[in-house]
Amino acid sequence: MPASCKICGSTNLDLKHNRIRDGAKEVDCNVWRCIDCEIVFLDMDIDEHQLLDYYKDGHFRDSYLPDIKDAESKKAEKFYSLKQPLQESRLNSLRDLFKEDMEVLDVGCATAGFLNLLKDLVGRVKGIELYRPHVEYARENLGLDVEMKNINDIAEEKFDVICTFQVMEHVAKPVYFLSQIYKRLKDNGLLIIEVPNIDDPLISLYDVTPYKDFYFMKPHLFYYSETSIASLLKKIGFNSVQFRSFQHYGLMNHLCWSLTGETSTATKVGGGGMSFPSKYSDSPALEAIMPFFEETNKKYKTMLEEQRKTDTLLVIARK
């Protein structure tokens, strides 16, 4: 058991789970929840230099699903096309926050799919990313200003908005990371964070043990709730913190996990819709039934968002 919480220092800890995913295998590792600040974290020692190399060299891809790993490791353009539907949904959820004169930085931008959608809506976009093939793709194929740097490596120029999508859970020192972002925000600037939600319905509502074995993974060092991330941001100095719930995975994904203890092949990458095996794709009966499934799926995701029991947290913090 760790001596104390890695964020607030409290010794008031509760065991959340005892298994994590490391590539294709499951390994023993305690997952602790701080009762005082609600942060959830892996009980493992972290070498920051090794962690940096882990991302620069692309080794973290081994911890994801085989088809996602394959798409990432072969060609950056495959990763880009795979993720664009998600980037479009992300922008639709946040579009109202951007104005045409804004300067925007995306920290951990991958192939810069979000910035490519955003570039014509704002004054300037810039990205930083540690994985070289993604940096090169964004620069050479999209013509975007993307550098292979960490947040503390870039000059302290100021931005109106800084985004970081699915990055915070990988960061070994969240307080330092957020303080570096804070320095690079203009007064009244916005920080937009997207992270996996520890109140994911498969954990908080359905308590699916095989999903927990899958959900907690070696690259994800910290897990956040609305309470824990708001506390962290206010500790840094942000004046206001708001949330927008977003449910990515759909009803079929949840049914598969709840009934079989694993995801279906159809939902591994996309996840959000109602998909069936391709051998049924030309069925007139299925074509007639699909509108019902699609409408049900839409209502299900909306209800989870209304109850704030979603797989994804969108956080908007103002300096």
Image (tube, rainbow, N blue to C red):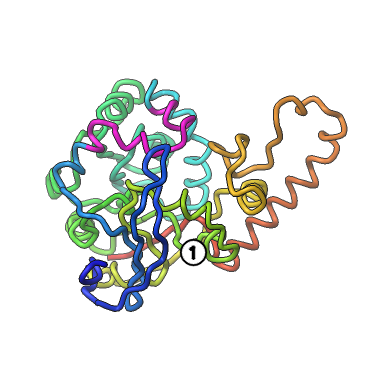
Q: How many marks?
A: 1
Mark 1 residue type: Asp
- Where does the image place residue 54, in percent across and percent down from the top left? 24, 38
Q: Which residue is mark 1?
A: 199
Say what secondary structure mark 1 lies in.
loop
Between residue 215 and residue 157, name the one nearer to us: 215
User: Residue, x 25% and y 28% (percent of image)?
Assistant: 132
Q: Residue furthest toward the front?
A: 28
Q: Position of residue 204 (x, y in %)?
A: 53, 65
Q: Main secondary structure of the magenta part?
A: helix
Q: Classify the position of the C terminus by image quarter.
A: bottom left
What residue do we see at 38% from left, 62% from top? 224
* Residue 265 x, y percent position in the rendering: 60, 35
Asked if the magenta segment contains residue 68, the reply would be: yes
Quadrant of the image containing the N terminus: bottom left
Rendered residue at 36%/43% (across/down): 22
Judge whether 74 appears above or below 175 on screen: above
Residue 57 is a magenta residue? yes
Callout 1 environment at 10 Å: few (<14), some (14 to 19), or many (20+)?
some
The quadrant in which residue 49 appears is top left
Please indicate whether residue 302 sits to the left or right of residue 284 in the image: left
Q: Is residue 165 visible?
A: no
Q: Name the one closer to the observer, 216 or 103.
A: 216
Q: Position of residue 97 (x, y in %)?
A: 42, 55
Q: Quadrant of residue 14?
A: bottom left
Horizontally, residue 12 falls left or right of residue 67, namely left
Give, as a single range, the part of the protein colored magenta: 54-72
Q: Nearer the viewer, residue 77 or 127?
A: 77
Along the horizontal axis of the image, is 228 left or right of 90? Answer: left
